[in-house]
Amino acid sequence: MCLIITAIAFVLCYILNKRSYSDFKSLLTVILGSSALMWTVDCTFALVNDGEFFDLSLDDTYLGLSVVLVALVFTSLVAAIKKVVALKAN
């Protein structure tokens, strides 16, 4: 489920970033795309080791939601720090 959640968040962020570019959405797109790629590799290795590709458990859903939330918080902190540094430079 974490792969599905991060992939949907990545696609939405990518589309929004293409409509109107901003550093915030660009960084968020990279973070979410990297997370989706990481989950794809993890699910592939689980499949190779006789597991399931998609884990649809509630814990995996919470993991996917927490990854998206942490990405949003981290990107917001980076944007706030950049704004403070830009204000101090002026």
Image (cartoon, rainbow, N blue to C red):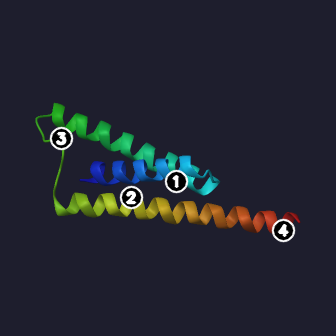
Task: Return the disc, 1 or 2, that comes first in the chain's sequence.
Answer: 1
Task: Return the disc, 1 or 3, that comes first in the chain's sequence.
Answer: 1
> Where in the figure is residue 9, as x and y percent of width and height?
39, 54
**Amino acid type assigned to the residue bearing label 2 in the image:** Val
User: With 50 as the anchor, is 30 left or right in this view?
Assistant: right
Which residue: 19% across, 38% down? Answer: 46
Q: CA distance from mark 1 to mark 3?
A: 25 Å
The residue carrying pointer 4 sits among few (fewer than 14), some (14 to 19) or many (20 or more) residues within 10 Å by Cα, namely few
Which residue: 44% across, 44% down? Answer: 33
Q: Which mark is residue 28?
A: 1
Q: Secondary structure at mark 2?
A: helix
**Amino acid type assigned to the residue bearing label 4 in the image:** Lys
Q: Is residue 80 above or below residue 20?
A: below
The residue carrying pointer 2 sits among few (fewer than 14), some (14 to 19) or many (20 or more) residues within 10 Å by Cα, namely some
Q: Is residue 38 above or below residue 78?
A: above
Q: Which mark is residue 53?
A: 3
User: With 75 as the anchor, is 67 left or right in this view?
Assistant: left
**Amino acid type assigned to the residue bearing label 1 in the image:** Leu
Q: CA distance from mark 1 to mark 2?
A: 12 Å
User: With 3 as the anchor, is 12 left or right in this view?
Assistant: right
Q: Residue under label 2, please give it.
A: 67
Q: CA distance from mark 4 to mark 2?
A: 32 Å
Q: Secondary structure at mark 1?
A: helix
Task: Return the disc, 4 or 3, that comes first in the chain's sequence.
Answer: 3
Task: Return the disc, 2 or 3, that comes first in the chain's sequence.
Answer: 3
> Where in the figure is residue 6, as x and y percent of width and height?
36, 52
Which residue: 37% across, 45% down? Answer: 36
Q: Quick one: which residue is furthest to the right in this view?
A: 90
Q: Residue under label 4, please give it.
A: 88
